[in-house]
């Protein structure tokens, strides 16, 4: 907010916005401010609680698309740690994910426990997946979620990847009961939490969209993991 805004904020706020919009000719920015004028100032303090939804093991040919549509409807960005083998089979879904503003991370090519592999095998699992994602999106992933949460840094190929674990495990893969997953994904959630889910099950997609609706109503903002890690 510039000086003018501060100087004039005591005057009728919406009138001010309309005048500035007309004068500056930058309608879209100010119209947006006008529409949300009641909370524009409040949003400037850093009190918004942030949470990241993360999905492993996909993309799935049916469920990931359903999830992407549901997230788009809700204007929510998520992080997808994809398997190389599934990305290879569903490049159109990876493309859609990327175009719709989600963050794409690496979950290895074939869902292996990296710490059980030689460094050459680790490199192969990681770089093969990175290359596949690059070929589809034009961007190399920077983040990796190691399967089973097992990570060491011995990969000889010197690929610098940032490992991302989680703080809330919904255990969505263990049940078809969406409501128990929703409970785990909404109970005692706090600012900065990273929620682990899988876009590989119908029940997970249903639960994830409910989690979004509930946490949004509680004032949470959904961000991609890079925003939580660099903060
Ligand atoms: Ni996994």
Image: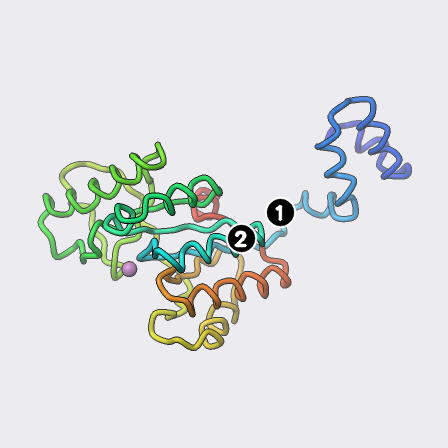
Q: Report the disc number at residue 75.
A: none
- Image coordinates for residue 56, horizontal then vertical, percent: 34, 57
Residue at mark 2: 222
Residue 176 in the image: above or below residue 89? below
- Image coordinates for residue 158, horizontal then vertical, percent: 19, 36
Between 156 and 112, the one nearer to me in the picture = 112
Q: Residues within 10 Å of mark 2 (few under 14, many from 20)?
A: many
Q: Secondary structure at mark 1?
A: loop
Q: Earlier in the sequence, mark 1 or mark 2?
A: 1
Q: Secondary structure at mark 2?
A: strand
Between 12 and 212, the one nearer to me in the picture = 212
Residue under the point 16% across and 55% down: 115
- Image coordinates for residue 116, horizontal then vertical, percent: 12, 57
Badges 1 and 2: C-beta atoms under 8 Å apart? no
Question: Which quadrant of the render holds ligand 1?
Answer: bottom left
Residue under the point 10% across and 43% down: 120
Q: Quadrant of the N terminus?
A: top right
- Image coordinates for residue 133, horizontal then vertical, percent: 30, 40
Q: Residues within 10 Å of mark 1 (few under 14, many from 20)?
A: few
Residue under the point 11% across and 53% down: 117
Cβ of mark 1 under 8 Å from ligand 1: the answer is: no
Cβ of mark 2 under 8 Å from ligand 1: the answer is: no
The CA span between labels 1 and 2 is: 14 Å
Q: Is residue 111 left or right of residue 58?
A: left
Residue 21 in the image: above or below residue 37? above
Q: Report the disc number at residue 46.
A: 1
- Camera-nearest label, 1 or 2: 2
Between 191 and 23, the one nearer to me in the picture = 23
Q: Is residue 53 left or right of residue 156?
A: right
Residue under the point 83% across and 25% down: 22
Question: Which quadrant of the view contains residue 34?
Answer: top right
């Amino acid at each position: 907010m510039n000086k003018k805004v501060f100087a004039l904020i005591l005057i009728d706020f919406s009138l001010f916005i309309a005048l500035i919009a007309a004068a500056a000719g930058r309608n879209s920015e100010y119209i947006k401010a006008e529409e949300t004028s009641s909370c524009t100032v409040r949003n400037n303090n850093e009190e918004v609680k942030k949470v990241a939804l993360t999905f492993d093991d996909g993309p799935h040919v049916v469920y990931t698309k359903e999830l992407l549509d549901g997230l788009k409807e809700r204007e929510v960005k998520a992080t997808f740690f994809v398997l190389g083998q599934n990305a290879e089979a569903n490049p159109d879904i990876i493309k859609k994910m990327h175009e719709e503003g989600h963050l794409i991370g690496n979950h290895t090519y074939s869902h292996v426990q990296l710490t059980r592999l030689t460094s050459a095998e680790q490199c192969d699992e990681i770089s093969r997946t990175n290359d596949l994602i690059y070929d589809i999106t034009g961007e190399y992933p920077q983040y990796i979620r190691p399967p089973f949460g097992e990570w060491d840094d011995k990969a000889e190929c010197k690929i610098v990847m940032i490992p991302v674990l989680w703080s809330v495990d919904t255990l969505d893969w263990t049940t078809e009961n969406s409501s128990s997953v929703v409970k785990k994904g909404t109970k005692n959630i706090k600012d900065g939490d990273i929620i682990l889910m899988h876009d590989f099950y119908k029940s997970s997609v249903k639960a994830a969209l409910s989690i979004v609706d509930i946490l949004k109503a509680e004032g949470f903002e959904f961000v991609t993991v890079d925003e939580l890690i660099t903060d």
